[in-house]
Amino acid sequence: MLLAILVVPLVAAVVAWWGPTRLAQGATVVAGAATFGLSLALVGRAGGRSQMALGGWLRADDLSLVFLLTTAFLYALTAVFAMGYVGRRHDPRYSRRLYAGLNLFCWAMAVTPVVNSLVEIWAALEIASVVSALLVALDDTDGAAEASWKYLIIASMGLGIALFGTVAMYAAGASALGPAYHMAIGPLLSVAHRLPPGLVRLAYLLAVLGFGTKMGLVPVHTWLPDAHSEAPTPVSALLSGALLAVSFYAILRYFQITGRAVGYAFPREVLLGFGITSLALAALYVVSQRDLKRLLAYSSIEHMGIMAIGMSFAAPLAVVGVLLQVLAHGAAKGTAFFGAGSVLAKLGTKDLRLIRGGIGVLPWTGPMLVLAVLALSAAPPFGIFRSEFLIVAGGLSVPSDGVVAVLVGLVVLAFLGLSWWATRTMASPTPAGGSTAGATVARGETSAWMVAAMAAGLVALAILGVHPPSALSHVLSRAASELGVGP
């Protein structure tokens, strides 16, 4: 199954590049569904033991499965959404580039959590960065080109810093394993107590700063709002729901090793600093946004901050909440970006000041976009409510009352900003006189495929919030144990 995950998206990318649009669409949907099905099968087989392939080059433990499942689910949803998104265009070259790029992008993100080496994690994220930067510029506008260059430059600098962190961790591991070792995660964890503390701390700091650039942590987040806003909608959904998550996965692997080597106080404090700063800035920017996709981009920064803060609590309950939030955020952000793409396709604008009467114009997408935004705002009964409840409960059990109070206050501020814009644009009536975008178009959906993708995302969010499957709950609990949180 791990080998199939390695091969299927690549085959779909080749088919999409050389085949006609219809074949590219079918291959992408099949590849997305197959990758998600394989991920579910791996979750079903998980029993607390790592699953290996290619002589140990591929390795999936419970922590890997959380991020693989997030990426695979969003891959499948995006493939369905793209059927309607690309179907509106009649440019075969655009379709070929989009589908080939989507499959290659999803391949790199699916491979990231299942490769068994810190070097290979870095390489997979580098491939994802290059491919996604090209996808950001796909619409060939001035804004898209500028956002793509900004993303490529900042992400390259971040991954350069992460490479220095990888080298530092290699040097630390060489002192215990010898210079010819492969930077596999298992051996590093087994000798973590023998690693030089100074080198490990340096490697961790560089990794958080470097991979944090891709994750969207403040102050290395500046590429994110522009890229998410200007990219084609399927790319925006994958950037926000999957790429940020697998970048967080890379940080957690360094967190795991560093905690065993020098104790968990240091890596937790580093994440707490980045998390509070990211959450505070994002909450303030959410309130003041005027662009629908930029609003969702800052919401992503908010959630990355919440995850970082949750990891800073020395409580298994909070870490389970963080890992559940990875899954729920991927589903919610994908669904919300799908709704934003439908609004843009229908009304021709992302300007929140011009969008009114969305529910009246888009009878299915409008209500579902409101629900997706409420899900992002941690409203029950969706998965993010459950995950943030666990994070807060874990913080109170430590106790970290002051940090929890700040967390709750900033989350409430972001909730007010997101919900206000959602109700103002979607639920408010269209003014007479045709002064807004929504007043000039006929009622009706752009594509049934786009509606289906949103509906599937909302169903997943409801399941994660009301009653996650028992197999998934066990995976989350074991993954939290693997991270070894402690004082």
Image (tube, rainbow, N blue to C red):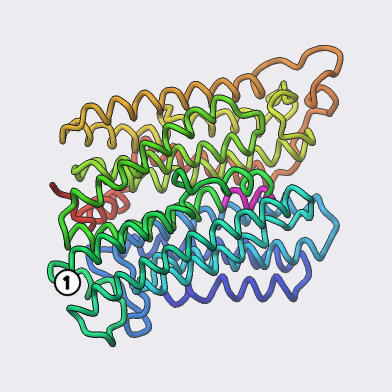
Look at the image and give the residue range highlighted in magenta.
Answer: 231-238
Which x, y percent locates residue 448? 70, 44
Q: Position of residue 275 (x, y in %)?
A: 36, 41
* 104 sits left or right of 469 in the view: right
Quarter residue 192 falls in: bottom left
Q: Amino acid at mark 1?
A: Ser
Q: Residue at x 54, y 64 (%)?
A: 128
Can residue 1 be seen from the camera position used here? no
251 or 186, nearer to the observer: 251
How many numbered discs sit on the rendered protein?
1
In the image: residue 348, left or right of residue 102? right
* Residue 232 belongs to magenta span: yes
Q: Identify whether 57 is placed above or below 140.
A: below
The image shows residue 253 at horizontal and vertical percentages of 31, 61
Front-most of residues 365 and 230: 230
Residue at 63%, 62% in the rendered image: 102
For this orientation, the residue located farthest to the bottom is 180
Q: Residue at x 23, y 41 (%)?
A: 313
- Position of the N terminus, as image quadrant, is bottom left
Q: Write down the residue under mark 1.
A: 190
Is residue 202 in view? yes
* 176 w.r.t. 89: above or below: below
Farthest top residue in view: 432
Nearest to the observer: residue 451 or residue 253: 253
* Label 1 crowd (10 A; few <14 / some 14-19 / many >=20): few
Is residue 91 located in the magenta-colored stretch of the structure? Answer: no
Main SS of residues in magenta: helix
When asked about the image quadrant of residue 86, the answer is bottom right
